[in-house]
Amino acid sequence: MSGAVATESAGAGLAGTQTTLLRQTAAVPTSDGAVLHATIDGRDDAPVTLVLAHGWTLAQAAWDDVADLLAPRVAVGELRIIRYDQPGHGRSSWGDGEVSIDQLGTDLGELIDRLAPSGPVVLGGHSMGGMTIMCLAASRPELFGDRVRGVALVSTAAGDLDPEPRTTAEKVRRKLTPGALNVALAGARVVERIRRMLPPTHPRHQKMVRDLLYGADATDAMVLAGAEIMHASTVRAFTAFLPALGAQDKRSELAALSRVPVEILVGDSDKLTPKRHSHEMAEALPDAALRVVERTGHMLTQERPQLAADAIERLLDAVVRADRTA
């Protein structure tokens, strides 16, 4: 495996049982000078590879709960899971070029080329990770329907995250009620002011994270886990990717996704990528399955990991059915 640096056995707790998985880590260089840190669970010859991309100021750990639920398929050799840190996040280094979501899409394609060079692939993207997948679909549409056989888009948007006001009323409302990215920026600024004074375990820190990212049913453990992942992000990750998120717009470039099954999930109280974005994607992809989840915020992969795992299972089963009838 290109870039593999370590192999070990990993245990995953599942409904009171212990499942032992083959785990490898890899360092994947990209064309713009970044090195992506990836974790690979499962055998290289598994019939399907699942690649999971995380969101802004998070890391591959944001997908851990979902990966744990899929571990039984990995353990019996049916599935291989690749989680990776986006550039400038987690243990991945920064690239040399301009920060853009298009570049993240290029990076994802290069990671697939290196770590999953053959066989069917299913992609899952949360928030910025979903935007990454849409950028890959726009730049390398030939992958979709051939190599990429299914896509899960979780708490994400194809564009229009910070729309320009068109009327006087909208301009006034924008001043009074900031757009989604302005809310995110305010949250990022607060995090940066308090992170050195208040650790993620502090109630004030957790309240800010809960209010911005989570729904009504989120547990304290979920909020603490998310706060700790965000706390590990750098100031540069908060600030460098924000304008890139606002500039990203692939609403007219989703055609490649129409070739594969698509599952769209969003929380009904998501403040960063409100549900209107998921409805817009579903309108552009009429064959996609859309699920709006009640009492759930932006961190759906943590808040409702079973629903995310179920959606991915449906995509995996579609791959298996198609291969059996081919």
Image (cartoon, rainbow, N blue to C red):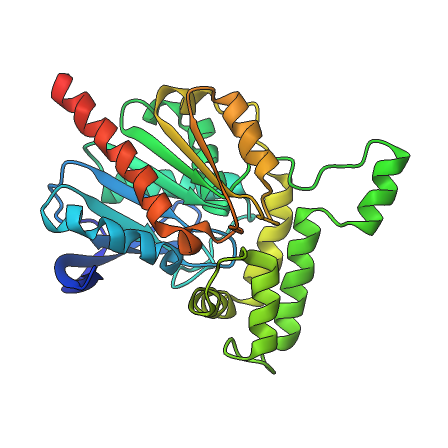
Image-quadrant location for residue 248: top right
Give the left or right position of residue 46, taking residue 135 as reference. Answer: left
Which residue occupies the foreground of this view, 25 or 131? 131
Query: Where does residue 206 sit, x and y in percent of width and height?
Result: 55, 71
Query: Where does residue 268 sit, x and y in percent of width and height?
Result: 56, 44
The answer to whether one can see residue 32 in this image is yes
| Quadrant of the snapshot with the C terminus | top left
Q: What residue is at 54 percent from the left and 57 percent from the top?
A: 216
Query: Where does residue 282 sit, x and y in percent of width and height?
Result: 50, 26
Give the left or right position of residue 223, taking residue 124 as reference. Answer: right
Q: What residue is at 24 percent from the left and 34 percent from the top?
A: 316
Image label count: 0
Give the left or right position of residue 89, taking residue 235 as reference. Answer: left
Establish if 72 lies above or below 166. below
Give the left or right position of residue 154, taking residue 7 as reference. Answer: right
Establish if 231 lies above or below 153. below
Establish if 234 lies above or below 316. below
- Residue lying farthest bottom? 197
- Residue lying farthest right? 168
Image-quadrant location for residue 11: bottom left
Image-quadrant location for residue 208: bottom right
Establish if 102 lies above or below 306. above
The answer to whether one can see residue 253 in this image is no
Query: Where does residue 163 sit, x and y in percent of width and height?
Result: 72, 37
